[in-house]
Structures are given as structure tokens and as C-alpha cells.
């Protein structure tokens, strides 16, 4: 399973790509595999705020609604509009065209609580038991 | 043996039924209530639509009004269900207990096995059917026409339609078990139906009543989960929450007739 080294990871299975004071956020390959085929995505509106560890959206797959939890707090500056019509991008390409939101990070110290690719890999192995 | 809570609710309208499930989900996820198995029926009958469905596109509102059928949007996924002459179950638990795996399909499988065990105990030849058919956006509206993973069937026909929500460290799965299947009514109420030949109901195979069915399903859950259930009621916290959710969400057209992208999703904490 692929966990790019340049990304940071949250225990609720989102990845974060930090660029300056901004961050792109999506779900990991592990998460999309666990969810199965995603048929709908609900994302926050531009201009809204995310709060670390709080829900920022939902996805529907296999007749289940799963909440998405924000890896960092911030101000939502962009959302991936392509996902409204092509939610399958999240399954097909979770780290690139399946990105979900871009935020302006409000507290960079929160990044310290995130995991590296290697730590995340170990975390999900332990979670699986 | 762990003791979990069983709630057998009196018949209620759809707005109350959905508000109660969410109130229990909140309380279980906050750790203030025990994992809960609940059974309920709908009075008056109602159509529930999936969280991402657009009721206006799925349901014939004029027909519903004429027939006295309410329309309510669920917190869970899946498609439209007509709750009329049926029994609904809901199971609500933290997602980190050893009785359930921490994923969607694993949870479906365990819950379905419990239901099958209960149905088998009253002589119904119910089976757990594993299917990989995709539940896409363009499939027919009716939940019962779309076998998904781990469906419960009798003679290849679907008996139970279920849906789930996960988040905040807990899950809610609820589902509808048809006592009688009124095909004509379903075709009138929903715009898009198809595959209704592959739907069945309890009355086609047994003359058991709802109370008897509930008892057998409780035993199925006790066996399948290795827990015992004690019948109880809602806590004061849950009653207050459910009243709030009914008033601010489930009884409102803004919630029931719009998709989440048009409403900004479920109200933020401050509104709860």
C-alpha cells in the first residue's frame, strides 16, 4: 500500500500535504480501500473553518455514511469540485486528483501531532491487529 | 457476560424515530449510554430516504400526502425505504468494542449474521448472501431492490434493507424487515423502482407477529454478539436530545427535501 513520504498522516486516515501556510487534505489509500466504492462526498464550503479532530465532511460508500475528521485546523480556501460528479477519483487516485480540501493552517504546531508515512503504516498494522 | 440495552419503542412517526436513533447514537458515542439494540415501527407510515438522496427526485410527494405517508431523510446511507407493515431494528455501539470489527462491511456481516440466526430460529430459511454488486448512483430508488454486501435473503429474495453511519467513535446501523410487501403501494410512492420481483416479506413464509419476531431477533443478537440484553428505556439526556433533533432537523422540510450539499450537512454543534 502506498503512503507517500512527503505527506503527513492523521490517525483518522487523512493525509496532509503542507505547502507554506496551506495544506491539501484527502484520505489515505488505506481509508479508501476500507470504505470501498465511494458514491457521494460532502465537503465544507469555501470560507468555513475546520477544527483538528472534528468532522469536516462525509462520504457514502457501501450504504454507509462515514464522517471525515480534520487533521489540522484552518480556513477552507478551496474544495475539489470534481468530486461532486466523480467521487470515484478518491478511490482511483487518493493522493492526487482525489484531494478533498485546501486550507490555510491556523495553528502550525498541530502539524507536530501528525504521523510520518512510516509511523502511519505501523499504526494501521497495529490497528488491524 | 456483558449486558447491553434493549429498547422496544412504541409506534412513532418517522421524524421521532430518526431523532431517537440519532439521540442514542450521540449518547453511545459520548460514552453516556450502553450499546443499544432497538426495535420500532412507524405510525403513520413513512418513506425514509438516504442521507445523500434528494427526496424530491425519489418520492412522489403528492401520492404520499394523499396516502398519509410522511417523508424523512435519514442520517445513514442507502436508498429509499417505505416503512409500512414492517419492523425496523437499530444497533448502536462504540466502534472499538471487540464484538464488531472497526469497518463498514465487517459490521454489516456481524449484524446480518445475528438477524439470520434469529430468523432461522423461527424456521425461516434466511441466508446471508455475499454480493459484490455495486450500489451506484443510477440504481433504482428502492433500497430493497439493490442487494449489497451481506444481504439477508430467503429463496434468493431480499428480506432486510440496512444502512449505516460511522463517526465520533461509534456506529449506527438500522434496517427494515418487511412483514408484508405491498408492491403496488411502493410503485406508487417511489419514482424509480425496479427489481421488485426479488423482494420478499415475513408473511410469505411465516405467520409470526411482530412481538414474536422481536423476541427471536433479540436471541439472535445475544447469540451472535455474546452479550445479554436488558430491556430499558431512553435516558433523560436521550429524550431531551431526541426532542431537539426532531424539532430542529427531522420534522423540517429544509432537512427532508434537500441534499446535504444544499444545506451544509448536519447542523454544527452549536445548533445541537
Image: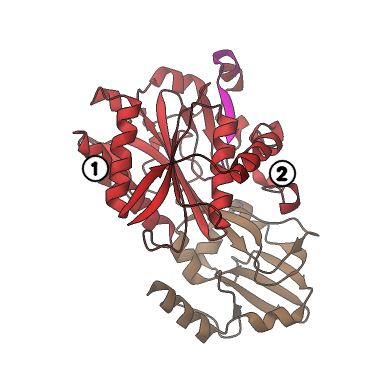
Give the number of callouts: 2
- The structure residue drawn at horizontal position 45% and vertical position 29%, both measured from the top left corner, is B193
Residue at position x 60%, y 32% in the image = B15
Residue B112 relative to residue B186: left or right: left
Question: Which quarter shows the C terminus of chain A?
Answer: bottom left
- Vertical relation: B72 (above or below) B26: above
Tell which of B86 and A83 is nearer to you: B86
Residue tagged 1: B127
What residue sits right under mark 2 in the picture?
B263
Q: Colour of chain B?
A: red
Question: Relative to residue A89, is residue A23 drawn left or right?
Answer: right
Write down the quadrant of residue A70 in the picture.
bottom right
Asked if the magenta segment contains residue B75, the reply would be yes
| Residue B62 drawn above or below residue B129 | above
What residue lies at 60% left-to-right and 51% top-to-bottom? A85
Q: Is residue B244 magenta?
A: no
- Quarter of the image where the N terminus of chain A is located: bottom left
Give the magenta-colored segment's residue range: B65-76
Residue located at (61% from left, 42% from top): B236
Q: Colour of chain A?
A: brown
Amino acid at each position: 500500500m502506498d503512503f507517500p513520504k512527503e505527506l503527513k498522516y492523521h490517525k483518522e486516515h487523512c493525509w496532509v500535504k503542507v505547502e507554506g501556510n496551506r495544506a491539501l487534505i484527502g484520505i489515505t489509500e488505506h481509508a479508501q480501500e476500507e470504505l470501498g466504492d465511494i458514491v457521494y462526498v460532502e465537503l465544507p464550503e469555501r470560507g468555513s473553518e475546520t477544527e483538528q479532530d472534528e468532522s469536516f465532511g462525509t462520504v457514502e460508500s457501501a450504504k454507509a455514511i462515514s464522517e471525515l475528521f480534520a487533521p489540522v485546523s484552518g480556513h477552507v480556501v478551496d474544495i475539489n469540485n470534481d468530486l461532486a460528479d466523480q467521487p470515484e477519483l478518491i478511490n482511483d487516485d487518493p493522493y492526487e486528483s482525489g484531494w478533498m480540501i485546501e486550507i490555510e493552517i491556523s495553528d502550525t504546531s498541530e502539524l507536530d501531532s501528525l504521523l510520518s508515512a512510516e509511523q502511519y503504516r505501523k499504526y494501521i498494522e497495529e490497528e488491524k491487529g | 457476560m456483558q449486558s447491553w440495552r434493549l429498547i422496544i419503542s412504541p409506534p412513532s412517526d418517522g421524524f421521532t424515530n430518526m431523532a431517537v436513533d440519532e439521540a442514542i447514537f450521540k449518547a453511545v458515542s459520548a460514552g453516556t449510554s450502553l450499546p443499544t439494540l432497538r426495535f420500532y415501527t412507524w405510525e403513520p407510515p413513512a418513506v425514509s430516504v438516504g442521507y445523500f438522496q434528494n427526496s424530491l427526485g425519489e418520492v412522489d410527494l403528492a401520492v404520499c400526502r394523499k396516502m398519509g405517508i410522511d417523508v424523512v431523510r435519514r442520517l445513514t446511507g442507502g436508498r429509499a425505504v417505505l416503512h409500512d407493515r414492517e419492523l425496523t431494528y437499530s444497533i448502536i455501539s462504540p466502534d472499538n468494542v471487540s464484538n464488531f470489527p472497526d469497518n463498514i462491511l465487517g459490521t454489516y456481516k456481524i449484524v446480518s449474521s445475528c438477524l439470520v440466526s434469529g430468523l432461522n430460529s423461527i424456521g425461516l430459511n434466511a441466508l446471508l448472501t455475499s454480493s459484490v454488486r455495486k450500489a451506484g448512483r443510477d440504481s433504482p430508488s428502492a433500497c430493497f431492490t439493490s442487494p449489497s454486501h451481506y444481504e439477508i435473503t430467503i429463496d434468493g429474495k431480499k428480506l432486510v434493507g440496512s444502512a449505516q453511519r460511522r463517526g465520533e467513535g461509534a456506529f449506527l446501523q438500522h434496517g427494515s424487515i418487511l412483514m408484508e410487501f405491498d408492491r403496488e403501494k411502493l410503485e406508487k410512492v417511489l419514482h424509480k423502482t425496479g427489481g421488485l420481483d426479488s423482494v420478499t416479506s415475513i408473511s410469505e413464509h411465516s405467520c409470526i407477529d411482530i412481538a414474536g419476531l422481536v423476541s427471536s431477533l433479540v436471541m439472535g443478537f445475544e447469540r451472535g454478539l455474546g452479550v445479554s440484553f436488558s430491556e430499558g428505556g431512553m435516558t433523560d439526556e436521550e429524550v431531551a436530545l431526541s426532542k431537539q433533533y426532531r424539532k430542529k432537523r427531522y420534522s423540517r422540510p429544509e432537512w427532508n427535501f434537500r441534499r446535504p450539499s444544499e444545506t451544509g450537512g448536519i447542523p454544527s454543534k452549536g445548533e445541537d
